[in-house]
Amino acid sequence: MPLHWKLVVDCADPNRLAAFWAAALDYEVEDHAAFIGRLLAVGAVGPEDVVEVDGRRAWRGLAAVRHPDDPVDAERGMGLGRRILFHAVPEPKRGKNRLHIDVHAAPGERDAEVARLEGLGASVVRVVTEHGGGHVTMTDPEGNEFDVQ
């Protein structure tokens, strides 16, 4: 039986990166507000664990995005399919990613997609042309590399 998985990205500001990647991929930011409320009510977590984002409670150190067509655990607000979890860590990013996301633009739309992503806060690192094709390497707002095909 195949294993269930998610991609976890260490970062400084999980909620900021979740907002960026939700817009970049047309995913949904997971809404854990009801679950957080229940945990606060029973004292399982404290107010120091929570922030307010766009008028709702969110985890201070975790945020996630999910594919809008995949199922959701309604009790926790957690996606049960394709998702990316952003996890706050104290240390800054060092060096090149060993794993990255490839974003596939529609045929003939790569430049427009790159411009859209720049408008969301991404930066172009380099344009790569090789083997009859190519891609644009970009970084998200925290410097994580990804490619636009």
Image (cartoon, rainbow, N blue to C red):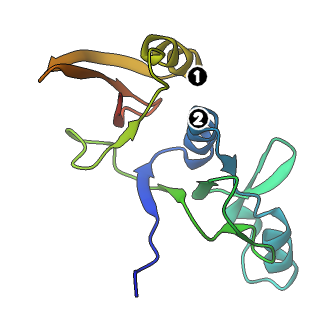
The image's mark for residue 3 is none
In the image, what residue occupies the spot 36% across and 24% down? 138
Q: Residues within 10 Å of mark 1 (few under 14, many from 20)?
A: some
Residue 89 seen in the figure: no
Image quadrant occupied by the C terminus: top left
According to the picture, the residue beneath numbered tag 1 turns out to be 120
According to the picture, the residue beneath numbered tag 2 turns out to be 20
Q: CA distance from mark 1 to mark 2?
A: 7 Å
Q: Are marks 1 and 2 in contact (CB under 8 Å)?
A: yes
In the image, what residue occupies the spot 25% across and 14% down? 127
Q: 104 or 11, which lies in front? A: 104
From what the image shows, is residue 110 above or below residue 77? above
From what the image shows, is residue 31 above or below residue 111? below
Q: 96 or 91, which lies in front? A: 96
Tag 1 secondary structure: helix
Image quadrant occupied by the N terminus: bottom left
For marks 1 and 2 on the same chain, the one whose residue lies earlier in the sequence:
2
Residue 57 is left or right of residue 99, and the answer is right
In the image, what residue occupies the spot 84% across and 51% down? 56
Amino acid carrying mark 1 in the image:
Leu
Tag 2 secondary structure: helix
Query: Where's residue 98, x and y in %?
Result: 21, 48
Q: Residues within 10 Å of mark 2 (few under 14, many from 20)?
A: many
Query: Where's residue 29, x and y in %?
Result: 69, 50
Residue 146 is left or right of residue 33, and the answer is left
From what the image shows, is residue 93 above or below residue 59? above
Query: Where's residue 139, x and y in %?
Result: 38, 28
Q: 40 or 140, which lies in front? A: 140
In the image, what residue occupies the spot 47% across and 27% down? 105
Amino acid carrying mark 2 in the image:
Phe
